[in-house]
Amino acid sequence: MTILSSQVTSVLPVALGHDPTASLCPWVQATRSTADYPSRKAQIAIAILNGTLTPTSDVVDLMYRCDGLCRCQPLPGQPDPTAYTNLIHDARAALVSGGFVSAAEQWATNWREYGNVYGRIELDESWLDRDSPSSAVLYVPGTASLFLDPAAAAANVQLLRRAFGSVTIDPELLDAGYVLRQLGLQTEWEAERDRVRELVARGGYQAVVTTTPREAIGLATALADQAAVVSSLLDSVQPWMTSMRTHLRPPDSRISFALQPTEEMAVERESAIILLEHLAHCSGREIVTLAPEATSPAAIERPILPSTEQLSRRFAETCADELLELHDGENLVVLTVDPFSKRALADQLGARARVVNVAAFLCEHLEGERTDA
Protein backbone atom coordinates (compact mmCIF):
# COMPACT_ATOMS: atom_id res chain seq x y z
CA MET A 1 0.00 0.00 0.00
CA THR A 2 1.43 3.38 -1.04
CA ILE A 3 0.19 6.68 0.30
CA LEU A 4 -1.36 9.00 -2.28
CA SER A 5 -0.17 12.58 -2.68
CA SER A 6 -3.70 13.84 -1.91
CA GLN A 7 -3.68 11.86 1.34
CA VAL A 8 -0.31 13.36 2.31
CA THR A 9 -1.66 16.83 1.67
CA SER A 10 -4.69 16.20 3.88
CA VAL A 11 -2.60 15.10 6.86
CA LEU A 12 0.36 17.47 6.51
CA PRO A 13 -1.13 19.99 8.99
CA VAL A 14 -1.01 17.19 11.57
CA ALA A 15 2.31 15.62 10.56
CA LEU A 16 4.14 18.96 10.44
CA GLY A 17 2.20 20.60 13.26
CA HIS A 18 3.24 21.53 16.77
CA ASP A 19 0.58 19.43 18.50
CA PRO A 20 -1.09 22.30 20.39
CA THR A 21 -3.94 20.01 21.42
CA ALA A 22 -1.93 16.84 22.05
CA SER A 23 -2.79 16.96 25.75
CA LEU A 24 -6.42 16.18 24.83
CA CYS A 25 -5.43 12.76 23.50
CA PRO A 26 -6.13 10.02 26.08
CA TRP A 27 -3.03 8.12 24.97
CA VAL A 28 -0.80 11.13 25.56
CA GLN A 29 -2.41 11.51 28.97
CA ALA A 30 -1.78 7.84 29.74
CA THR A 31 1.80 7.48 28.48
CA ARG A 32 3.03 11.08 28.95
CA SER A 33 5.29 10.37 25.99
CA THR A 34 5.91 12.61 22.98
CA ALA A 35 5.93 9.42 20.87
CA ASP A 36 2.14 9.44 21.22
CA TYR A 37 1.81 12.98 19.84
CA PRO A 38 -0.32 12.98 16.68
CA SER A 39 2.46 14.56 14.60
CA ARG A 40 4.84 11.72 15.48
CA LYS A 41 2.25 9.06 14.67
CA ALA A 42 1.33 10.75 11.39
CA GLN A 43 4.98 10.89 10.33
CA ILE A 44 5.53 7.23 11.20
CA ALA A 45 2.32 6.21 9.41
CA ILE A 46 3.45 8.02 6.25
CA ALA A 47 6.86 6.31 6.46
CA ILE A 48 5.19 2.89 6.85
CA LEU A 49 2.98 3.48 3.82
CA ASN A 50 5.90 4.76 1.74
CA GLY A 51 8.00 1.75 2.71
CA THR A 52 10.79 3.85 4.19
CA LEU A 53 10.46 2.42 7.70
CA THR A 54 10.88 -1.19 8.78
CA PRO A 55 8.36 -1.60 11.61
CA THR A 56 9.49 -2.86 15.01
CA SER A 57 7.18 -4.17 17.72
CA ASP A 58 7.27 -0.71 19.33
CA VAL A 59 6.12 0.87 16.07
CA VAL A 60 3.27 -1.64 15.80
CA ASP A 61 2.18 -0.85 19.38
CA LEU A 62 2.30 2.87 18.62
CA MET A 63 0.12 2.57 15.51
CA TYR A 64 -2.56 0.80 17.56
CA ARG A 65 -2.56 3.53 20.21
CA CYS A 66 -5.09 5.73 18.45
CA ASP A 67 -8.85 5.39 18.72
CA GLY A 68 -9.99 7.98 16.21
CA LEU A 69 -11.48 10.29 18.83
CA CYS A 70 -10.31 13.37 16.88
CA ARG A 71 -9.75 15.29 20.10
CA CYS A 72 -6.25 16.21 18.94
CA GLN A 73 -7.53 18.15 15.91
CA PRO A 74 -10.22 20.65 16.89
CA LEU A 75 -8.43 23.68 15.43
CA PRO A 76 -10.50 25.94 13.11
CA GLY A 77 -9.69 25.65 9.43
CA GLN A 78 -8.04 22.24 9.71
CA PRO A 79 -8.81 19.60 7.07
CA ASP A 80 -11.28 16.82 7.72
CA PRO A 81 -10.13 15.34 11.06
CA THR A 82 -11.02 11.86 9.85
CA ALA A 83 -8.11 12.11 7.38
CA TYR A 84 -5.70 11.44 10.26
CA THR A 85 -7.78 8.50 11.50
CA ASN A 86 -7.91 7.05 7.98
CA LEU A 87 -4.13 7.45 7.71
CA ILE A 88 -3.65 5.43 10.92
CA HIS A 89 -6.06 2.75 9.71
CA ASP A 90 -4.22 2.53 6.37
CA ALA A 91 -0.90 2.18 8.20
CA ARG A 92 -2.35 -0.66 10.27
CA ALA A 93 -3.54 -2.36 7.09
CA ALA A 94 0.00 -2.11 5.73
CA LEU A 95 1.37 -3.60 8.95
CA VAL A 96 -1.10 -6.48 8.79
CA SER A 97 -0.44 -7.22 5.11
CA GLY A 98 3.28 -7.11 5.82
CA GLY A 99 2.96 -9.71 8.56
CA PHE A 100 4.02 -7.39 11.39
CA VAL A 101 0.89 -7.84 13.56
CA SER A 102 1.04 -11.28 15.15
CA ALA A 103 -2.55 -11.21 16.41
CA ALA A 104 -4.05 -10.35 13.02
CA GLU A 105 -4.41 -13.94 11.81
CA GLN A 106 -6.42 -14.88 14.91
CA TRP A 107 -8.70 -11.88 14.42
CA ALA A 108 -9.25 -12.86 10.78
CA THR A 109 -9.81 -16.51 11.70
CA ASN A 110 -12.42 -15.57 14.30
CA TRP A 111 -14.20 -13.41 11.75
CA ARG A 112 -14.29 -16.19 9.18
CA GLU A 113 -15.48 -18.80 11.69
CA TYR A 114 -17.80 -16.79 13.92
CA GLY A 115 -18.65 -13.60 12.02
CA ASN A 116 -16.92 -11.51 14.69
CA VAL A 117 -13.46 -11.02 16.16
CA TYR A 118 -14.35 -12.20 19.68
CA GLY A 119 -15.49 -15.82 19.49
CA ARG A 120 -18.58 -17.99 19.33
CA ILE A 121 -21.88 -16.21 20.07
CA GLU A 122 -25.09 -18.04 20.97
CA LEU A 123 -27.89 -15.84 19.69
CA ASP A 124 -31.14 -15.81 21.67
CA GLU A 125 -33.68 -16.78 18.99
CA SER A 126 -36.51 -15.10 20.90
CA TRP A 127 -35.07 -11.71 19.92
CA LEU A 128 -35.68 -12.42 16.26
CA ASP A 129 -39.46 -12.53 16.71
CA ARG A 130 -39.82 -14.38 13.39
CA ASP A 131 -43.63 -14.32 13.51
CA SER A 132 -43.83 -10.52 13.50
CA PRO A 133 -44.09 -8.60 10.22
CA SER A 134 -40.89 -7.08 8.88
CA SER A 135 -40.14 -3.66 10.31
CA ALA A 136 -38.78 -0.53 8.63
CA VAL A 137 -36.34 -0.31 11.56
CA LEU A 138 -33.32 -2.64 11.59
CA TYR A 139 -31.31 -3.14 14.79
CA VAL A 140 -27.66 -4.11 14.33
CA PRO A 141 -26.62 -4.88 17.93
CA GLY A 142 -22.90 -5.29 17.32
CA THR A 143 -21.17 -8.54 18.15
CA ALA A 144 -19.28 -6.93 21.04
CA SER A 145 -22.58 -6.41 22.86
CA LEU A 146 -23.77 -9.93 22.06
CA PHE A 147 -20.48 -11.49 23.16
CA LEU A 148 -19.77 -9.46 26.30
CA ASP A 149 -23.20 -8.61 27.66
CA PRO A 150 -26.09 -10.55 26.08
CA ALA A 151 -28.47 -9.50 28.87
CA ALA A 152 -27.86 -5.84 28.03
CA ALA A 153 -28.32 -6.60 24.32
CA ALA A 154 -31.71 -8.16 25.16
CA ALA A 155 -32.65 -5.02 27.10
CA ASN A 156 -31.68 -2.91 24.08
CA VAL A 157 -34.08 -4.94 21.94
CA GLN A 158 -36.85 -4.55 24.52
CA LEU A 159 -36.38 -0.78 24.68
CA LEU A 160 -36.35 -0.39 20.90
CA ARG A 161 -39.55 -2.42 20.59
CA ARG A 162 -41.23 -0.26 23.21
CA ALA A 163 -40.13 2.82 21.28
CA PHE A 164 -40.86 1.68 17.71
CA GLY A 165 -43.35 -1.13 18.19
CA SER A 166 -41.55 -3.44 15.80
CA VAL A 167 -37.83 -3.87 15.13
CA THR A 168 -36.12 -6.33 12.81
CA ILE A 169 -33.00 -8.22 13.83
CA ASP A 170 -31.31 -10.00 10.96
CA PRO A 171 -29.15 -12.93 12.12
CA GLU A 172 -27.06 -12.37 8.98
CA LEU A 173 -26.36 -8.78 9.98
CA LEU A 174 -25.38 -8.56 13.64
CA ASP A 175 -22.40 -6.28 13.12
CA ALA A 176 -21.33 -3.59 10.63
CA GLY A 177 -17.81 -5.02 10.55
CA TYR A 178 -16.10 -1.65 11.04
CA VAL A 179 -13.89 -3.22 13.67
CA LEU A 180 -12.09 -4.90 10.76
CA ARG A 181 -11.11 -1.50 9.38
CA GLN A 182 -9.96 -0.38 12.83
CA LEU A 183 -7.82 -3.47 13.24
CA GLY A 184 -6.19 -3.17 9.84
CA LEU A 185 -7.96 -6.13 8.22
CA GLN A 186 -8.66 -4.13 5.09
CA THR A 187 -9.53 -6.99 2.73
CA GLU A 188 -12.03 -8.43 5.21
CA TRP A 189 -13.48 -4.95 5.86
CA GLU A 190 -14.08 -4.23 2.18
CA ALA A 191 -15.84 -7.57 1.68
CA GLU A 192 -17.99 -7.11 4.80
CA ARG A 193 -18.85 -3.52 3.89
CA ASP A 194 -20.18 -4.65 0.51
CA ARG A 195 -22.18 -7.46 2.15
CA VAL A 196 -23.72 -5.07 4.70
CA ARG A 197 -24.70 -2.61 1.98
CA GLU A 198 -26.40 -5.36 -0.01
CA LEU A 199 -28.36 -6.69 2.98
CA VAL A 200 -29.59 -3.25 4.05
CA ALA A 201 -30.56 -2.30 0.49
CA ARG A 202 -32.42 -5.60 0.04
CA GLY A 203 -34.35 -5.06 3.28
CA GLY A 204 -35.47 -1.57 2.25
CA TYR A 205 -35.04 -0.26 5.82
CA GLN A 206 -35.81 3.36 6.57
CA ALA A 207 -33.74 3.41 9.76
CA VAL A 208 -30.82 1.38 11.06
CA VAL A 209 -30.01 1.47 14.77
CA THR A 210 -26.88 0.16 16.43
CA THR A 211 -25.79 0.07 20.05
CA THR A 212 -22.93 2.54 20.54
CA PRO A 213 -21.94 5.80 18.83
CA ARG A 214 -18.77 4.23 17.50
CA GLU A 215 -20.72 1.36 15.92
CA ALA A 216 -23.06 3.95 14.39
CA ILE A 217 -20.07 5.71 12.85
CA GLY A 218 -18.90 2.44 11.34
CA LEU A 219 -22.35 1.60 10.00
CA ALA A 220 -22.78 5.09 8.53
CA THR A 221 -19.41 4.65 6.82
CA ALA A 222 -20.53 1.39 5.25
CA LEU A 223 -23.89 2.84 4.16
CA ALA A 224 -22.52 6.21 3.07
CA ASP A 225 -24.77 6.79 0.04
CA GLN A 226 -27.83 4.77 1.07
CA ALA A 227 -31.16 6.25 2.14
CA ALA A 228 -31.42 4.53 5.53
CA VAL A 229 -30.89 6.83 8.51
CA VAL A 230 -28.23 5.47 10.89
CA SER A 231 -28.27 6.26 14.61
CA SER A 232 -27.04 4.89 17.90
CA LEU A 233 -29.43 3.41 20.43
CA LEU A 234 -29.80 6.44 22.68
CA ASP A 235 -30.20 8.87 19.79
CA SER A 236 -32.85 6.71 18.15
CA VAL A 237 -35.11 6.57 21.21
CA GLN A 238 -34.59 10.17 22.34
CA PRO A 239 -37.80 11.57 20.73
CA TRP A 240 -39.80 8.72 22.26
CA MET A 241 -38.17 9.29 25.65
CA THR A 242 -39.34 12.89 25.50
CA SER A 243 -42.92 11.73 24.94
CA MET A 244 -42.59 9.27 27.85
CA ARG A 245 -41.17 11.86 30.24
CA THR A 246 -44.07 11.66 32.68
CA HIS A 247 -43.94 7.87 32.65
CA LEU A 248 -40.49 7.57 34.18
CA ARG A 249 -40.49 6.45 37.80
CA PRO A 250 -37.79 8.38 39.64
CA PRO A 251 -34.87 6.28 40.87
CA ASP A 252 -33.81 6.44 44.51
CA SER A 253 -30.13 6.64 43.61
CA ARG A 254 -27.90 9.32 42.24
CA ILE A 255 -27.38 8.70 38.52
CA SER A 256 -24.21 9.30 36.54
CA PHE A 257 -24.18 8.72 32.79
CA ALA A 258 -20.86 7.39 31.48
CA LEU A 259 -20.30 8.52 27.90
CA GLN A 260 -17.89 7.04 25.42
CA PRO A 261 -15.05 9.54 25.00
CA THR A 262 -15.37 10.63 21.38
CA GLU A 263 -16.04 14.00 19.84
CA GLU A 264 -17.96 12.23 17.06
CA MET A 265 -20.85 11.50 19.42
CA ALA A 266 -21.92 15.08 20.17
CA VAL A 267 -25.54 14.23 19.35
CA GLU A 268 -25.56 11.32 21.77
CA ARG A 269 -24.18 13.65 24.46
CA GLU A 270 -27.27 15.80 23.91
CA SER A 271 -29.51 12.73 24.18
CA ALA A 272 -27.79 11.73 27.42
CA ILE A 273 -28.32 15.21 28.86
CA ILE A 274 -32.01 15.08 27.88
CA LEU A 275 -32.38 11.71 29.61
CA LEU A 276 -30.73 13.03 32.76
CA GLU A 277 -32.99 16.08 32.73
CA HIS A 278 -36.02 13.78 32.46
CA LEU A 279 -34.86 11.81 35.50
CA ALA A 280 -34.30 15.00 37.47
CA HIS A 281 -37.75 16.26 36.48
CA CYS A 282 -39.43 13.02 37.59
CA SER A 283 -37.70 13.03 40.95
CA GLY A 284 -38.04 16.74 41.62
CA ARG A 285 -34.44 16.90 42.77
CA GLU A 286 -30.96 17.08 41.34
CA ILE A 287 -29.89 13.44 41.15
CA VAL A 288 -27.99 13.23 37.90
CA THR A 289 -24.68 14.13 36.34
CA LEU A 290 -22.45 13.29 33.41
CA ALA A 291 -19.58 11.05 34.36
CA PRO A 292 -16.02 11.99 33.42
CA GLU A 293 -15.59 11.27 29.71
CA ALA A 294 -12.47 9.13 30.07
CA THR A 295 -14.75 6.22 30.78
CA SER A 296 -13.50 3.59 28.38
CA PRO A 297 -11.52 4.35 25.27
CA ALA A 298 -12.37 2.57 22.07
CA ALA A 299 -9.20 0.54 22.51
CA ILE A 300 -10.95 -1.95 24.76
CA GLU A 301 -13.75 -2.27 22.23
CA ARG A 302 -11.66 -4.72 20.30
CA PRO A 303 -9.09 -7.46 20.86
CA ILE A 304 -5.82 -5.58 20.80
CA LEU A 305 -2.19 -5.84 21.79
CA PRO A 306 -1.54 -6.56 25.49
CA SER A 307 0.36 -3.31 26.02
CA THR A 308 -2.57 -1.33 24.65
CA GLU A 309 -5.09 -3.22 26.78
CA GLN A 310 -3.07 -2.38 29.87
CA LEU A 311 -3.08 1.32 29.03
CA SER A 312 -6.80 1.22 28.25
CA ARG A 313 -7.56 0.03 31.76
CA ARG A 314 -5.93 3.14 33.15
CA PHE A 315 -8.73 5.24 31.72
CA ALA A 316 -11.37 3.21 33.54
CA GLU A 317 -9.35 3.54 36.77
CA THR A 318 -9.16 7.31 36.32
CA CYS A 319 -12.88 7.60 35.64
CA ALA A 320 -13.77 5.39 38.61
CA ASP A 321 -11.64 7.50 40.95
CA GLU A 322 -13.26 10.71 39.68
CA LEU A 323 -16.76 9.28 40.06
CA LEU A 324 -16.13 8.20 43.64
CA GLU A 325 -14.64 11.58 44.47
CA LEU A 326 -17.69 13.35 43.04
CA HIS A 327 -20.21 11.11 44.78
CA ASP A 328 -18.45 9.88 47.87
CA GLY A 329 -20.78 7.94 50.15
CA GLU A 330 -23.82 8.27 47.86
CA ASN A 331 -25.96 5.47 46.47
CA LEU A 332 -24.59 5.70 42.94
CA VAL A 333 -25.78 4.12 39.68
CA VAL A 334 -23.64 4.57 36.56
CA LEU A 335 -25.42 4.23 33.22
CA THR A 336 -23.75 3.38 29.92
CA VAL A 337 -24.66 1.97 26.50
CA ASP A 338 -21.18 0.55 25.93
CA PRO A 339 -20.53 -3.04 27.10
CA PHE A 340 -16.81 -2.31 27.41
CA SER A 341 -17.40 0.74 29.59
CA LYS A 342 -19.77 -1.32 31.70
CA ARG A 343 -17.25 -4.11 32.18
CA ALA A 344 -14.29 -1.83 32.85
CA LEU A 345 -16.17 0.42 35.29
CA ALA A 346 -17.77 -2.51 37.10
CA ASP A 347 -14.32 -4.02 37.59
CA GLN A 348 -12.97 -0.77 39.01
CA LEU A 349 -15.96 0.34 41.10
CA GLY A 350 -16.84 -3.05 42.54
CA ALA A 351 -19.49 -2.84 45.26
CA ARG A 352 -19.10 0.93 45.60
CA ALA A 353 -21.51 1.62 42.70
CA ARG A 354 -23.88 -0.23 40.40
CA VAL A 355 -23.04 -0.08 36.68
CA VAL A 356 -26.13 -0.62 34.53
CA ASN A 357 -26.96 -0.72 30.84
CA VAL A 358 -29.10 2.34 30.08
CA ALA A 359 -31.75 0.34 28.20
CA ALA A 360 -32.17 -2.05 31.13
CA PHE A 361 -32.46 0.93 33.47
CA LEU A 362 -35.11 2.63 31.33
CA CYS A 363 -37.17 -0.54 30.94
CA GLU A 364 -37.05 -0.97 34.71
CA HIS A 365 -38.22 2.58 35.42
CA LEU A 366 -40.72 3.09 32.62
CA GLU A 367 -44.41 2.88 33.47
CA GLY A 368 -46.96 1.96 30.82
CA GLU A 369 -46.46 0.92 27.24
CA ARG A 370 -45.44 2.63 24.05
CA THR A 371 -47.32 5.78 23.12
CA ASP A 372 -47.45 7.59 19.80
CA ALA A 373 -47.49 10.99 21.46
Image (tube, grey):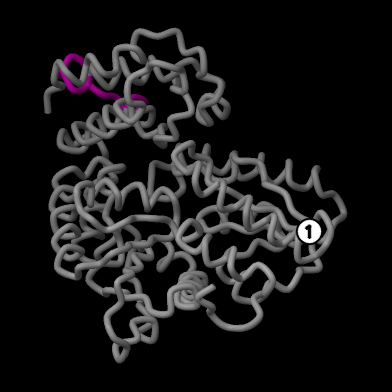
Type of residue at label 1? Answer: Arg
* Vertical relation: 54 (above or below) 66: above
Q: Secondary structure at mark 1?
A: strand
Q: Based on the picture, tell me whether residue 217 belongs to the magenta stretch.
A: no
Q: Nearer the viewer, residue 87 or 365?
A: 365
Q: Nearer the viewer, residue 288 or 174?
A: 288
Q: Is residue 244 left or right of residue 194?
A: right
**Residue in the picture at 43% in, 79% down:** 165
Task: Say which residue label 1 marks.
Answer: 254
* Vertical relation: 9 (above or below) 202: above
Query: Residue 196: horizontal and vertical position, in percent?
Result: 19, 59
Query: Residue 285: horizontal and vertical position, in percent?
Result: 84, 58
* Vertical relation: 287 (above or below) 361: above
Q: Residue furthest right?
A: 329
**Residue in the picture at 26% in, 53% down:** 106
Q: Residue furthest front?
A: 373
The local crowd at label 1, few if under 14, some if 14 to 19, many if 20 or more residues have their Cα within 10 Å, is some
- What segment is highlighted magenta in the picture? 48-59
Quadrant location of the N terminus in the rendered image? top left
Q: Nearer the viewer, residue 132 or 259?
A: 132
Q: Nearer the viewer, residue 303 or 307?
A: 303
Query: Residue 195: which quarter of the image?
Result: bottom left
Query: Residue 149: horizontal and vertical position, in percent?
Result: 49, 68
Q: Residue furthest bottom?
A: 131
* Vertical relation: 333 (above or below) 364: above
**Residue in the picture at 38% in, 27% down:** 62
Q: Based on the picture, tell me whether residue 52 belongs to the magenta stretch.
A: yes
Query: Residue 162: horizontal and vertical position, in percent?
Result: 50, 77
**Residue in the picture at 34% in, 65% down:** 140
